[in-house]
């Protein structure tokens, strides 16, 4: 049976997996507004396709950070102080994207619209890139001392390994978003989204394979959880191949599920490789933050568990209902809000 510390580690992992799965296609669609759309009408279709969902999807990130703060306060403190600058840029990008969704259609000006469209693209590219850099740094190791203070230099955070992770996640979000577009649109836009996703599969596969190889040689997570991680890698390869198969046969629902599975397995592998650690010290293994030394007291964890089990069904029920209500495809001839 799981201890409360283990339970909350799993719950935080689930929250971040849910965030990347759901917000991942939002980020992808945001990038599509510049990479796929040919005109303003198509950009409006793309924005409206995620209009009912994007803000609720971001709640998974907020909830994950909040759960981290409550269950593992020392993890939260070390993480957010050490990665202060990347998180500020990610937050500003998310704010700019949200504002752009609301403001781009408020004035009939080409310069006005283009400015906000640029914010949508940057706000969809930068957060997944920066978050991937942060998560990759987790497993590579960071200079954390005995007082749980992180003193990371630029190259500790930005290096070949973390940058490859960033571009891999960005491209995965784009492909995931393209498959979401095939589910929410029709006609030429749907066809071009499917075709672009197929073209991007090869470079995405190369990046994923490269990142796995780099992870094997540059981190210790395969030493710690080798058997389980190899199972995850095999499942990821199967999901990736099936995604390509379903794209080729125009089974978009299944293809979207498979790209989402690749995303979920990738994020899950980070937490599997970390456990029972939450942050790895490159200075001394004794300085690692773990689910034990970074956790709140047992009473706090118990109260949080009761509250979470009470509220979680309502939150999940609301989000499932919203996806059910807004599941219909969007046509270019329909009224476009943004």
Image (cartoon, rainbow, N blue to C red):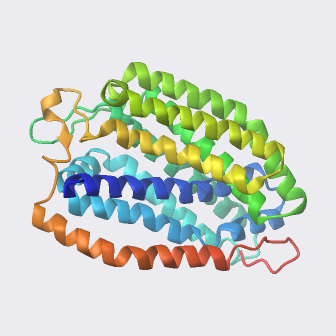
Residue 56's spot in the image, x, y percent?
51, 71
- Answer whether residue 93 is visible to the viewer in this image: yes
Front one among 169 and 85: 169
- Side (left or right) of 304 relative to 335: left
Q: Residue at x 51, y 53 (%)?
A: 20
Left or right: 292, with 63 as reference point: left
Q: Which residue is located at x 43 percent, y 32 percent? A: 229
Where, by quadrant of the figure, is residue 124 drawn?
A: bottom right
Left or right? Give the position of 226 relative to 127: left
Q: Position of residue 289 (x, y in %)?
A: 19, 41
Residue 107's image quarter? bottom right
Q: Position of residue 173 (x, y in %)?
A: 60, 48
Quadrant (top left, top right, bottom left, bottom right) of the C terminus: bottom right
Asked whether 151 or 190 is in front, the reply is 190
Image point 70% across, 73% down: which residue? Answer: 327
Q: Residue at x 83, y 44 (%)?
A: 195
């Amino acid at each position: 049976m799981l201890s409360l510390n283990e339970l909350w580690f799993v719950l935080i992992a689930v929250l971040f997996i849910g965030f990347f799965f759901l917000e991942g296609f939002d980020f992808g669609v945001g990038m599509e507004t510049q990479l796929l759309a040919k005109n303003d009408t198509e950009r409006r279709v793309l924005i409206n396709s995620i209009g009912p969902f994007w803000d609720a999807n971001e709640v998974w990130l907020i909830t994950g950070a909040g759960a981290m703060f409550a269950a593992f306060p020392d993890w939260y403190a070390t993480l957010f102080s050490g990665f202060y600058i990347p998180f500020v840029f990610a937050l500003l990008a998310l704010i700019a994207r949200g504002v752009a969704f609301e403001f781009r259609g408020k004035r009939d000006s080409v310069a006005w619209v283009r400015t906000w469209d640029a914010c949508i693209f940057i706000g969809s590219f930068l957060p997944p890139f920066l978050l991937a850099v942060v998560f990759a740094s987790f497993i590579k190791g960071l200079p954390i001392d005995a007082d749980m203070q992180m003193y990371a230099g630029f190259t500790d955070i930005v290096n070949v390994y973390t940058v490859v992770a960033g571009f891999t996640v960005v491209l995965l979000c784009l492909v995931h978003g393209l498959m979401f577009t095939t589910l929410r649109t029709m006609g030429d836009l749907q066809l071009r989204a499917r075709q672009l996703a197929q073209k991007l599969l090869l470079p995405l596969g190369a990046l994923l394979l490269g990142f796995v190889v780099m992870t094997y040689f540059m981190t210790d997570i395969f030493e710690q959880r080798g058997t389980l991680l190899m199972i995850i890698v095999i499942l990821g390869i199967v999901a990736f191949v099936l995604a390509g198969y379903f794209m080729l046969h125009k089974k978009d629902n299944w293809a979207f599920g498979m790209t989402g599975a690749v995303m979920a397995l990738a994020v899950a592998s980070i937490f599997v490789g970390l456990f029972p650690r939450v942050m790895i010290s490159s200075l001394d293994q004794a300085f690692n933050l773990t689910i034990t030394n970074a956790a709140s007291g047992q009473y706090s964890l118990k109260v949080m568990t009761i509250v979470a089990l009470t509220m979680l069904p309502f939150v999940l029920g609301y989000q499932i209902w919203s996806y059910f209500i807004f599941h219909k495809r969007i046509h270019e001839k329909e009224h476009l809000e943004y």
